[in-house]
Amino acid sequence: MKIKFLAAAVTATAIIAGTASVQAQKLDKFGADLGKKSVMGKEVRVPYTDLISYYGYIKPGATPDAKVGGKNYYYLYLWIPAVAPEVGVRMISPIPSSMSPEETDFVGADYKANEAERTNYFDTWITLEKASGVTKPEDIVAKGASASWNSFGVNDDSSEMPAQPSGSKYNSLMRVTSETSDPLKSLTIGLYRVGFTTFKTGDVQGSFLAQVGAPVKLPGVKIASNMEALMNAVMAK
Ligand SMILES: [Ca+2]
């Protein structure tokens, strides 16, 4: 009986592993660092209360938003309308096959125009930055254009994310905690951006899904591929 039970358990494990290797069909819930517990040696996280999604696509040969260290960088601008104790950012490429934009999701124009090519992907790398001195929606463009940006950190590859079609775990995830003692690193109302590139060799091209989560509700949080679009979205309410 015991041997039979073990064999059944091994088979079940193999089936689960087989399903997992097809992977990237859907993302797991995005869990917070805040309130994280260890239960029987496993990390248990409470999912973020607020989660916004941006579906994007970078065309081969697209003009980057910036060149940093010889790399093509792109930005997603983010308006955070309330104080957050923590913010998480993750990016997956390509967009998991079973996921598509819902009504409340943000969708880039290039995603809509290239939906048929959404299986193209790149090795993601992300950073979260905050603009100094932009605390009012009406200042997003005027002050954001010349603001200095302060990085909260970077992430290249996260083991928490599903593997890419190559089998490599090259997708990105990071969480940052508000440092209230430092205004440049406190998650207060203001203008932020997610910078992304591909850190290893190759170009940024293909579909991506970016998500920003917080353990508190952020009514009016918006994300857009440029500051003008972001300001319009925030001002429209
Ligand atoms: Ca990566």
Image (cartoon, grey):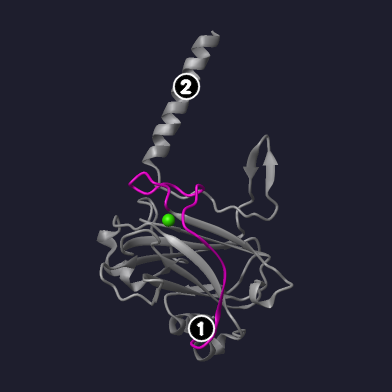
Q: Is residue 110 magenta?
A: no
Residue 74 found in image quarter:
bottom left
Q: Which residue is under mark 2?
A: 10
Q: Is residue 162 magenta?
A: yes
Residue 81 found in image quarter:
bottom right
Alpha carbons under labels 1 and 2: distance apart = 55 Å
Q: Residue at x 31, y 64 (%)?
A: 203
Amino acid at the residue labelled 1? Ala
Q: Which residue is under mark 1?
A: 236
Residue 49 found in image quarter:
bottom right
Residue 147, percent across and down? 54, 85
| Magenta span main SS | loop
The residue most toward the bottom is: 142
For the magenta stretch, what is the residue range?
144-170
Q: Residue at x 29, y 62 (%)?
A: 115
| Front position in the image: 198 or 115 | 198
| Observer able to see residue 101 | no
Q: Is residue 20 left or right of residue 79?
A: left
The residue most toward the right is: 181
